[in-house]
Image (cartoon, rainbow, N blue to C red):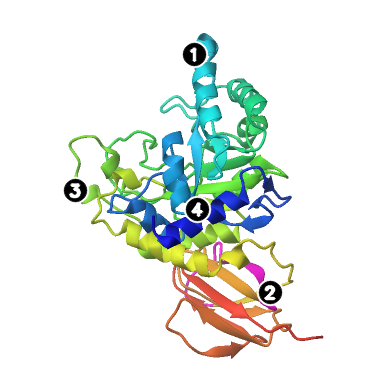
Amino acid sequence: MTRREFVALAALAKRGAGRIAIDSDGMISVAGRRRFWLGLYQLPRIPDAWRAAADAGFHLVRVSPAELPEARRHGLYGWIALGSIRPSREAEDEARIRKIVEQARHDPALLFWETEDEPTFVWKKPGELRIPPEQLIRTRRFVEKLDREHPFYLNHSPTNLESTLRKYNEAADIVATDIYPVIPHGIRELYALWPDGRQGDLLNTYISQVGQYADKMRRVAGPGRAVFMVLQAFAWENLREKDRDPRMVLYPTREQTRFMAYQCVVHGVNGILYWGLEYTPADAPVWSDLERVGSEFRELASELAERPLKVALKLEYYDTGHSLDRGIEWILKPSRGGAVLIAVNADCNPVEVTFRGLERFREARELFTRRTETVRTEEMRARFEPFGVRIWRLGPQTRS
């Protein structure tokens, strides 16, 4: 064990698993430290993947009980899927779940439990529920007799009515949905896709649908629960077991990956998880793109964990020859005596805009760009490419 890994292990053990809390805005804290969580359902298919995940700024990996020590060794947290207690196999499922919980519940690397994935989704049979809410609620109550320290996570498919999804809330402290909108036109029938070749079912077919689904899940979760989003780290065609069409292998680009992540932040989610790396070849660009996002999120870690500032920001748009649909979405987070402004263009066309209402800050410096100029905040004009992201550090605040 290297010194770095020993320090990570010691720090993780010191935090303890018994001090996990969900604040009123849904942010999860451990030992009093709030954190915006960045996680992976699967590790990348590269050498030394555990270390690569930690170095890239990820905090969390879905694991088996036997993998918790490895997560802990790298300073990572893990979550464990338990399944649920089926009425037809109650004794068998209770024994299996009891064994897992008793094996893992004291490990300081454990962050939360999961029961079942997408319990409402039945492909080609809309309106049917794969697993009724009572089964998951019953499972949670059973686990809580063994462990009341760890919250419960539940991921839904992006479809179904909000009223249907809310019936599962008693089984969850963290509510999520998985939306993977980068899909090639003309893809053949594939599990989880509608006949029109889409996974989601909103009118918005662009990647900015991610923000709309984040809003939907916040409404589903209600107050006091965390909201996570599960984003795309794969190409849909690679999910096909045989007879793949190489022309249909389409990964999210770096720009798309970055936009979807920051749009989630702007829409107030508390964590992002990525699914699909086990289906993604090591030579695909996906992992390097996720490293880029992770490095930026690591630099903004303290700001992302904060509650947003309430500022009456006004936007003045300029004609670019296109209609304005969704326009600029933004969030302002406190930072080092100033703030960080995160803004995304949810339109498929370029947008030019002036931000007004930032006079309390003296200047603005853009982050993660080759632009080096510092600008005055009284009239901050900016151009955004389609689905573009721009981030500024503002400050210091004036005394007035």
User: What is the three-letter code of the residue carrying label 1?
Assistant: Glu
**What stretch of residues is rendered in magenta?**
319-337
Q: Earlier in the sequence, mark 2 or mark 4?
A: 4
Q: Earlier in the sequence, mark 3 or mark 2?
A: 3
**Residue 364 in the image, given as x and y percentages of width and height:** 60, 84
What whole-number distance in Å separates the C-alpha atoms at marks 2 and 1? 59 Å
Give above or below for 35 relative to 78. Answer: below
User: What is the three-letter code of the residue carrying label 4?
Assistant: Leu
Q: Earlier in the sequence, mark 3 or mark 4?
A: 4
Residue 281 is one of the magenta-drawn residues: no
> Of circles 2 and 4, which is in front?
4
Query: Disc 3 on helix, strand or loop?
Result: helix
Viewer can see residue 330: no
What whole-number distance in Å separates the C-alpha atoms at marks 1 and 3? 43 Å
Query: Disc 1 on helix, strand or loop?
Result: helix
Give above or below for 149 relative to 295. Answer: above
Q: Residues within 10 Å of mark 4 (few under 14, many from 20)?
A: many
User: What is the three-letter code of the residue carrying label 3?
Assistant: Pro
What whole-number distance in Å separates the C-alpha atoms at marks 1 and 4? 35 Å
User: What is the three-letter code of the residue carrying label 2?
Assistant: Lys
Using the rendered view, name the quadrant where residue 308 is placed. bottom right
Task: Assess whether mark 3 and mark 1 are in contact (beta carbons under 8 angstroms).
Answer: no
Using the rendered view, name the quadrant where residue 267 is placed. bottom right
Residue under pointer 4: 9
What whole-number distance in Å separates the C-alpha atoms at marks 2 and 4? 46 Å
**Residue situated in front as seen by the camera: 153 or 243:** 153
Asked whether, in this view, residue 346 is left or right of residue 165, the answer is left
Residue under pointer 2: 314
Residue 92 numbered mark, or none: 1
